Image (cartoon, helix red, strand yellow):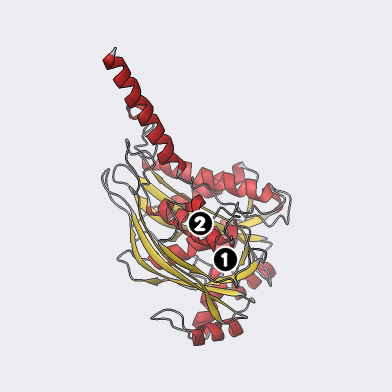
Amino acid sequence: MKLSISFSSKTVCFVIACLVCLSGLQPVTGTAAAAGHKKDISGYLIAVLPIDNLSGTRAPVKDIRQLMLKQLTVRGGRVLDDSALEGFMAARRMRYTGAMDLETSRMFSRETPVDAVLITSLELYDEIYPPKIALISRLVSVGEKPEVLWTDGIGLSGDDSPGILGLGLINEQGLLLEKAVRHLMVSLEDSLSAASEGVASGHWLSGWGRYGPKTFYRSPVLSPETKYTIAIMPFLNRSERKYAGDIMVLHFLRQLKGSGRFNVIEPGIVRDDLLGFRIIMNEGISFADASLIFSTIEADADLILSGTVIDYQDYHGPEGAPKVDFSVQVIERKSAEVVWTSKSYNTGNEGVYFFDMGRINTAHTLASGMAEAVAGMMTAGPGN
């Protein structure tokens, strides 16, 4: 009898502890932001650009693109013929496929029947067991005023959901890749079928307990009622991870757009303006830089977001934990003041105590949650 009572008490305590642990987690789901311009995916003729490889390793980017083309067409999507795309890119000497500047957007509209361009960045590709993959995609309209219509990302590891006796383990990179691409294309299809943008729920600190910044300052100038147009500057990369700054820009693009509270300027336009005016920010953005950017950027911006990546680590093999460390600063145009600063740092095994429950296996998933927390807290006031 004593043994039975003891076992029962321990079981109850274990269940309660698991529930408490899980209650603090926020699921990192696909963020889909649709403009609602057309009824469904078949209403767009899409140019699928070659994959921008930010993984820092060799990867089958052509195979990934072909898989995306297949998934698009299966869902009724219409894509620009490869020969037509190659001809356009050759004529325009278009080599960089990670963003779209204003002139390229105009030329796509004038010289091709394309409605939008699909831009995809490969963040992580690791074939070592368990395999890992991370992708971030966005659909950008073409013409005089290019707009980010949709953006989403996904980070997967073969041991994310091992299940009982390891039956949920994914050992083959091909299967993991197919799962990731299918997620993105389903998200795109659902987004283009939606009537309006999804708006973040606006939970304050309690909603992002795990991912919220360690320190932050939010000016009362930021209004939760205003929908801002925001320009994301290239992040300074102080980490050892190649392209970490570019990757963080994409995370913030996704989360700011997905919140429904921001119009985000296509990063290619920002990049082109900085190059055109030879603006170099070796030590972050100054007020002088901000003033010049506000006055010269092609699209009117209310806010400028800049940041620094200190650490962005994935790990190889079954043991380890991803790490992400970055800071963010936002300057507002009218007041010419810093209206947001924050410092974020997390690891994938933070707050994990029982059987790896809640463990995060990719820096992508970790950074996505952290960027979402910053994006939500920037405009959501206490009590919302």
> Where's residue 345, x and y in %?
37, 60
> Where's residue 20, x and y in %?
42, 39
Q: For the residue labelled by badge 1, is the local secondary structure a helix, a strand or a loop?
A: helix
Residue 93 in view, yes or no: no
Q: For the residue labelled by badge 2, is the local secondary structure a helix, a strand or a loop?
A: helix
Depth-wise, is mark 2 or mark 1 nearer the camera? Answer: 2
* CA neighbours of label 1 inside 10 A, class few (<14), some (14 to 19), many (20+): few
Inspect the image, locate mark 1, and give the three-letter code of the amino acid beneath it.
Gly
At horizontal 45% and vertical 52% (from top left) the residue drawn is: 209
How many numbered badges does the structure rendering display? 2
Residue 208 in view, yes or no: yes
**Lateral position of residue 254 relative to residue 156, left or right:** right
**Quadrant hosting residue 381:** bottom right
Label 1 sits on residue: 87
The outermost residue toward the top is: 1
Inspect the image, locate mark 2, and give the three-letter code of the amino acid beneath it.
Glu
Label 2 sits on residue: 372
At horizontal 44% and vertical 83% (from top left) the residue drawn is: 280
